[in-house]
Image (cartoon, rainbow, N blue to C red):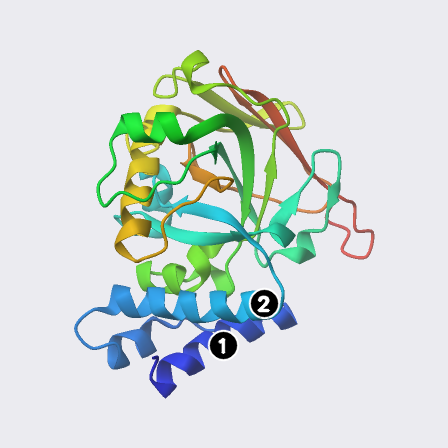
Amino acid sequence: MLNPELIQAADRLWLAAERREPCLPVRDEIARFAGADPIAAAYAIQQYNTERALVAGRRLVGRKIGLTSVAVQRQLGVSQPDFGMLFAHMARQEGEEIDCGDVLQPKAEAEVALVLERDLSHAVHTVADIIQATAFALPAIEIVGSRIANWDIQLTDTIADNASSGLFVLGTRPVSLGALDLANCGMCMELAGEPVSVGAGAACLGHPLNAAIWLANTMSRVGAPLKAGDIILTGALGPMVPVQHGHVLTAHIEGLGSVTASFHVNSKQGDA
């Protein structure tokens, strides 16, 4: 059970999302009131708000892995991965215009998504376990966001803030893992035909399946193993890109094809 000070930190993040108004960081409260394990306390805050979302009727559909790219780690000043929850209301379809206002301080990154057809419930998983459990892979664009003002985050801030989750768009052409070389697949994300983020599968903990192993082991350790049907966003293949109204981003991932995220024009803001 969270102590009252950490519940207040959870409430701050929850209200920031509800009101669409960024809040102050929560790391100081976590440092003061978490005891010996601030990272565990940050995940406890995340879980507190996850349970609140489930009570509100939101449907959990998977997990995201964050901070797997060295480039993204450098951008945010952290040095290890984290995970967050994916809910059905966070999914957007290709061709659907996305409102930037649905995510606070949105940024986009291209990723490999895995969709499971078997549970991953071992304490320790192998790459073979991940391959056998995966139905198919898809290209994905994750639109990350921070409830914390100016992206002023450290590791415990982003963990508590559901790993800075926002929205995600999946491609629609499933590809078997056997047809892919995910370590060496190149990625290029374009805005108006110009490259804005470039990377490769090796940027994601050396291989997207390494990220999936880390997640599967971690979720088993915390008592919430991955299940058949879960979506896994394995992590960024290149640097994050800020997005605005009117932007159309297309991510090309070698072997997986392309996925596009379109942000509608908001004439009131005049930033298209």
Q: Position of residue 164 (x, y in %)?
A: 47, 55
* Residues at circles 2 and 1 in contact by the CB criterion of under 8 Å: no
In the orientation shown, which residue stands out farthest toward the bottom? 4
Let me know if residue 111 appears in the view.
Answer: yes
In the orientation shown, which residue stands out farthest toward the left? 36
Along the line of sight, the residue nearer the viewer: 156 or 215: 215
CA gap, disc 2 and disc 1: 9 Å
Q: The residue tagged with tag 2: helix, strand or loop?
A: helix
Quarter occupied by residue 139: top right
Along the line of sight, the residue nearer the viewer: 206 or 21: 206
The residue positioned 33% from the left and 71% from the top of the image is 27
Q: Is residue 134 above or below residue 74?
A: above
Q: Position of residue 91 (x, y in %)?
A: 63, 46
Q: Earlier in the sequence, mark 2 or mark 1?
A: 1
* Three-letter code, disc 1: Arg
Q: For label 2, count other residues whose C-alpha is less than 10 Å away and answer few (under 14), some (14-19) or many (20+).
A: many
Let me know if residue 23 appears in the view.
Answer: no
Q: The residue tagged with tag 1: helix, strand or loop?
A: helix
The residue positioned 30% from the left and 50% from the top of the image is 220
Quadrant the C terminus occupies: top right
Which residue in the structure is indicated by mark 1?
12
Q: Viewed as shown, does residue 106 lie left or right of 96?
A: left
Q: Position of residue 211 (x, y in %)?
A: 33, 37
In the orientation shown, which residue stands out farthest toward the top? 179
Quadrant the N terminus occupies: bottom left
* Three-letter code, disc 2: Ala
Q: Is residue 52 above or below residue 2?
A: above
**Residue 53's disc number:** none
Q: Viewed as shown, does residue 80 lie left or right of 44?
A: left
Q: For label 1, count other residues whose C-alpha is less than 10 Å away and answer few (under 14), some (14-19) or many (20+).
A: many
Along the line of sight, the residue nearer the viewer: 196 or 177: 177
**Residue 17's disc number:** 2
